[in-house]
Image (tube, rainbow, N blue to C red):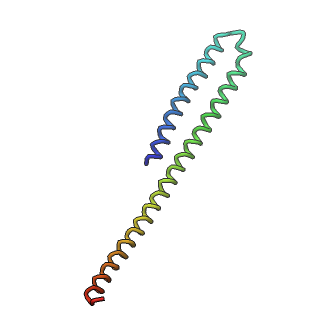
Amino acid sequence: MHMLGIVTTFRNKVQAMLQTLHAMVLTIKVRCLKLGALRTLMIPYVDFITNQFAKIKQNINRLVAYLISQALSIKVGVMLVLHKVGQLGQQLLTTARQTLQRVYKALKRGH
């Protein structure tokens, strides 16, 4: 559960950063439109920045999805280990009880 919390925190921080970047791209576009004559020179750069922003956002979304799946896989692995440890602990407890019973029987017989 803790791993999912870390991934969620990471996702929230990345989303905040993406919102900031998106606002910056929009600001650049608005300023570019206000420049008038330089607008035609600036549009390819603004389009390039916008495309790069979209690619970064897509890659980050993939990364977050991957991290969530990995966190869930780790959680399942830990649950399996805990289950196996519980089984081994139960076997150890059973063996200890049986050994103790055998010792009592041996003491009663005088061995």
Lateral position of residue 32 relative to residue 6, left or right: right
**Which residue is at 44% across, 46% downward?**
2
Would residue 100 be found to the left or right of residue 32 on screen? left
Query: Where residue 5 sits: x, y (%)?
Result: 45, 43
Q: Nearer the viewer, residue 74 or 46?
A: 74
Residue 88, position as x, y percentages in the image: 42, 69
Residue situated in front as seen by the camera: 34 or 84: 84
Examine the rendered structure and indicate whether residue 104 appears above or below residue 14: below
**Displayed quadrant of residue 24:** top right
Indicate whether 30 appears above or below 61: above
* Residue found at the very far bottom of the displayed protein: 109
The residue furthest front is 111
Q: Residue at x 65, y 14 (%)?
A: 32
Q: Residue at x 52, y 54 (%)?
A: 73
Q: Quarter of the image holding residue 111? A: bottom left
Find residue 29 and report its horizontal and vertical position in percent: 63, 18
Q: Nearer the viewer, residue 86 or 73?
A: 86
Say above or below: 108 vs 63: below
| Residue extending farthest right | 41
Quadrant assignment, res 99: bottom left
Image location (x, y in percent) of residue 72: 50, 52
Left or right side of 83 for 65: right
Count the labels in the image. 0
Q: Residue sitting at 54 percent across and 25 percent down?
A: 20
